[in-house]
Amino acid sequence: KYDGGRVTGYSEDIDTLLVFAGLFSAILSAFVVQTYQLLQPDNLDATNRLL
């Protein structure tokens, strides 16, 4: 009886954590995709190094 309550509680906690992890992963992936597009080498800096 006592163990059944604990198992149910842990199951609900794990479900909540999995939802949070999924949402966090989706938001982080969207941020990384948008930021990755902005990462370009600075052509002026490369030219200065060659000179």
Image (cartoon, rainbow, N blue to C red):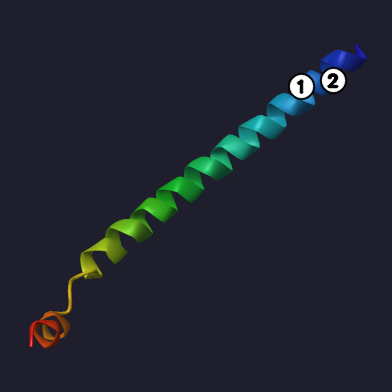
The structure residue drawn at horizontal position 55% and vertical position 39%, both measured from the top left corner, is: 19
Q: Which residue is mark 2?
A: 5
Q: Which residue is mark 1?
A: 8
Q: Is residue 6 above or below residue 48?
A: above
Which quadrant of the structure image shows residue 7?
top right
> Given the image, on which type of amino acid does mark 1 rest?
Thr
Frontmost residue, 5 versus 38: 38
Tag 1 and tag 2, C-beta contact below 8 Å = yes
Q: Is residue 8 left or right of residue 18?
A: right
Residue 34 pos. (x, y %): 28, 63
> Element at badge 1?
helix
Frontmost residue, 30 versus 48: 48
The structure residue drawn at horizontal position 12% and vertical position 86%, both measured from the top left corner, is: 44
In this view, the residue farthest toward the right is: 2
> Given the image, on which type of amino acid does mark 2 rest?
Gly
Residue 41 pos. (x, y %): 17, 73
Q: Is residue 4 above or below residue 41?
A: above
Q: Is residue 34 above or below residue 41?
A: above
Which quadrant of the structure image shows residue 5?
top right
The structure residue drawn at horizontal position 13% and vertical position 80%, both measured from the top left corner, is: 46
